[in-house]
């Protein structure tokens, strides 16, 4: 563990690697490693996961889900697979 500095914490004194003080390197928006496209893909993945989860909950409480629900779940699975392929090069 690294020693902490005695000075007050400011955004410039905080580090992403757990270091504080002179060896700290602040990470700003200008150093972002993910593009807007990657962020949009991750959001789309999250949305498909959330929708699939809702359909799973519906299937649990319904003895015989409607055919449209099953089809929608299959389409969400296919969409998630394609999004996953787009996220991982």
Image (spheres, rainbow, N blue to C red):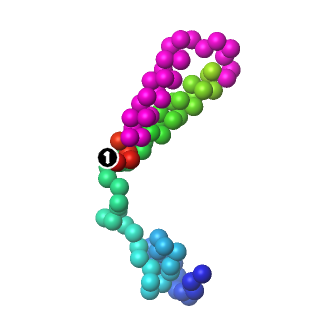
Q: Is residue 10 visible?
A: no
**Viewed as shown, does residue 54 lie left or right of 30?**
right
Q: Is 47 a magenta residue? A: no
Residue receiving disc 1: 37
Quarter of the view holding residue 87: top left
Residue shown at 33% from the left, 65% from the top: 31
Which of the image's four quarters has the N terminus?
bottom right
Name above or below for residue 29 compared with residue 78. below
**Viewed as shown, does residue 14 lie left or right of 55?**
left
Q: How many marks?
A: 1
Name above or below for residue 46 compared with residue 19. above
Residue range (magenta): 60-85
Q: Position of residue 71 (x, y in %)?
A: 49, 17
Residue shown at 35% from the left, 61% from the top: 32
Main secondary structure type of the part rendered in magenta: helix
Quarter of the view holding residue 45: top left
């Amino acid at each position: 563990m690294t020693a902490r500095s005695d000075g007050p914490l400011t955004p410039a004194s905080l580090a992403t690697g757990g270091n504080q003080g002179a060896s700290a390197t602040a990470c700003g928006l200008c150093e972002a490693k993910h593009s807007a496209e990657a962020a949009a893909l991750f959001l789309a993945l999250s949305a498909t996961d959330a929708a699939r989860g809702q359909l799973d909950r519906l299937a649990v409480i319904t003895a015989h889900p409607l055919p449209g629900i099953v089809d929608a779940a299959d389409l969400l699975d296919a969409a998630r697979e394609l999004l996953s392929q787009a996220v991982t090069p």
